[in-house]
């Protein structure tokens, strides 16, 4: 982490430096700001990264009981024989719309 004095700093240089490491801005030798580079992140990432509600959700999910990958694979393997009985599925684009259940509906992103 780099520190710079507010009185001697150039904002453009601080922003450039912040893309590589965090920059702490000092006023009278005391920290007053932190500059964090966000180059390469999209708006959704920035919004989630600074959302208290999102981080509370993550924290609560991390406290929940989990299963190992081996347990997950066993569960999937146990569930798959019933899927095989129905026969081999065709790729979505090769089935008539009556089989996909989508018909002529227009689906718009929300």
Image: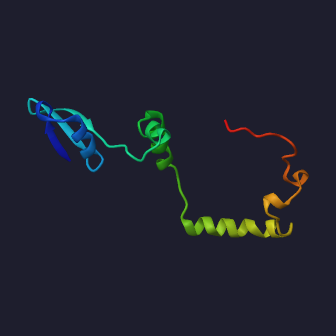
Q: Nearer the viewer, residue 13 or 2?
A: 13
- Measured as percent of width and height from the top left, residue 110 is found at 67, 35
Give the mark count. Answer: 0
Relative to the observer, which residue lies in front, 52 or 102? 102
Classify residue 91 by image quadrant. bottom right
Instruction: Tell me residue 74's x, y (percent).
Output: 64, 69
Image location of residue 100, percent across then percent down: 84, 53
Q: Residue at x 53, y 53 (%)?
A: 65
The answer to whether residue 70 is above or below residue 6 is below
- Residue positioned most to the left: 28
Residue at (55% x, 66% y) in the render: 69
**Residue 55 drawn above or below residue 86:** above
Residue 89 in the figure: left or right of residue 7: right
Q: Is residue 46 left or right of residue 106?
A: left
Quarter of the view holding residue 12: top left
The quadrant in which residue 75 appears is bottom right
Horizontal side of 97 relative to 77 (left or right) equals right
Instruction: Decide which of 17, 71 is in the foreground and name it.
Output: 17
Determine whether 104 is above or below 83 in the image.
above
At a point 47% along the width and 48% down the height, the residue shown is 63
**Residue shown at 16%/42% (left/top)?**
3
**What x and y, as percent, mark residue 86?**
86, 66
* Vertical comparison of 58 with 33: above or below: below
- The chosen color scheme is rainbow
């Amino acid at each position: 982490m780099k520190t710079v004095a507010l009185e001697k700093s150039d904002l453009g240089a601080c922003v450039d430096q912040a893309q590589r490491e965090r920059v702490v801005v000092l006023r009278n030798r005391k920290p007053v700001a932190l500059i964090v580079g966000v180059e390469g992140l999209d708006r959704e990432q920035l919004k989630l990264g600074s959302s208290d509600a999102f981080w509370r959700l993550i924290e609560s999910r991390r406290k929940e009981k989990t299963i190992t990958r081996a347990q997950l694979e066993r569960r999937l393997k146990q569930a798959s024989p019933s899927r095989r009985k129905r026969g081999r599925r065709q790729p979505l684009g090769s089935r008539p719309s009556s089989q996909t259940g989508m018909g002529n509906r227009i689906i718009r992103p929300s």
